[in-house]
Amino acid sequence: MSDRPMFSVVTPTYNRKYCICSAIESLMCQTFGDFEQIVADDGSTDGTVELLKSEYAKEIASGKIRILELGHGGVCAARNAALEAAKGEWIAYLDSDNIVSSDFLQTFADGIKSHPDAKCFYAALMRTSDKSILDRPFDRQRLLRANYIDMGVYCHHRDLIDEFGAFDTDFGAIEDWDLIVRHTSKYTPVRLGHVVLMYNNDASDDRLSRKFDIQAGAYERFRRKHEPNACLNDVDVEVIRRSWFFDPEWYMAEYGKLLAGADPAAHYLVRGWKNGLHPGPYFDGAQYLARNPDVAQALINPLLHYERSGRKEGRIGFLRRKPFPRQTER
């Protein structure tokens, strides 16, 4: 790898004429100059492309900014087109409503120099709403539960595109989470710990996360794709379903909004127990795991373990004499 890396910065956009120039200006002020920005316009109808051609004619002529004029195919298709066109050895990302610091690329370049064998890196961000900082140590199991590495602070070698593929068009706004989970299944990312992004987390209705993150079934597709036991074993689901301690009506009443149409037994088997959900009013899975650390360390669903072997082994201490109170009673 070169000591002086070349970056391709991917910026998908759709009808963001009102904000994209601020994002571009922040990138054009980098202290590290070896980069190209690829703006993948996803069929905008608000004059975004015309504005960029007018405002950044010099940068476009020099190749510092490249504009891809695409049909409207969604953010995944736009990012994938940019990845295919990228010339840089390293890929970084800047969404059209975010702002990067002047040392955004320098931070990654320093990381690449300090860790020549690493394939991916992540830095920290600051949310615009409350100035809180998101910067957590890497933990694979935590990442599978929820994404804490935003695409805007993630950088990876282009080889990872060939190895893992591009963005999965089956997803909406969680395509970034999916990509990072795939990369980190093999390569541990280097945490750089420096704030390089002002992340726009307002609640405007045109944000992709507002439109797609609540898609029915999106998270279940993610779980099936990535979790070790997510390719559901029908036998295991039936064990949960037949357990005296699993109450599907109670589970639906308590957690129905979280299921996104999933079968209650399957949801509890794959995801619910990890989020501290109870299978019914009398079984305390968290207590079972606390009293049986070998089960917790093995990442086994507590009710599944109990029904398969825990009962015979005499493992108790998880039953509640009084049922869990209803959510409305808490």
Image (spheres, grey):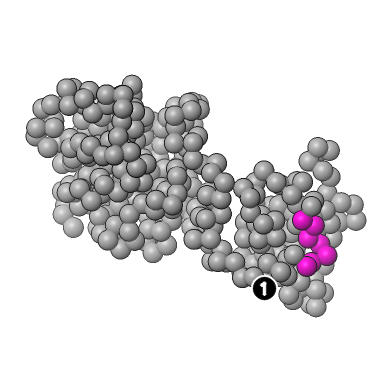
Q: What x and y, as percent, mark residue 50?
A: 21, 25
Q: Which residues are magenta?
A: 242-248
Can residue 106 be spotted in the picture? no
Element carrying mark 1 = helix
Q: Is residue 208 magenta?
A: no
Q: What x and y, as percent, mark residue 233?
A: 61, 70
Q: Quadrant of the N terminus?
A: bottom left
**Mark 1 surroundings: few (<14), some (14-19) or many (≥20) residues within 10 A:** few
Q: Quadrant of residue 314?
A: bottom right
Farthest residue, direction bottom: 312
Please give left or right for residue 266 compared with residue 109 in the image.
right
Q: What x and y, as percent, mark residue 36?
A: 18, 40
Q: Quadrant of the C terminus?
A: top right
User: Which of the two residues, 124 or 275, is positioned nearer the viewer here?
Assistant: 275
Q: Quadrant of residue 306?
A: bottom right
Q: What x and y, as percent, mark residue 4?
A: 15, 48
The residue under the point 9% across, 34% down is 62
Q: Is residue 246 magenta?
A: yes
User: How many numbered discs, if any?
Assistant: 1
Can residue 234 be spotted in the picture? yes
User: Which of the two residues, 20 or 144, is positioned nearer the viewer here?
Assistant: 20
The residue under the point 29% across, 39% down is 71
The residue under the point 41% across, 32% down is 199
Q: Quadrant of residue 245?
A: bottom right
Characterize the magenta stretch by its predominant secondary structure.
loop
Q: Mark 1 = which residue?
A: 235
Please give left or right for residue 58 compared with residue 98 in the image.
left
Farthest residue, direction right: 321
Given the image, on which type of amino acid does mark 1 rest? Val
Vertical comparison of 255 with 236: above or below: above
Vertical comparison of 20 with 125: above or below: above
The residue under the point 21% across, 30% down is 28
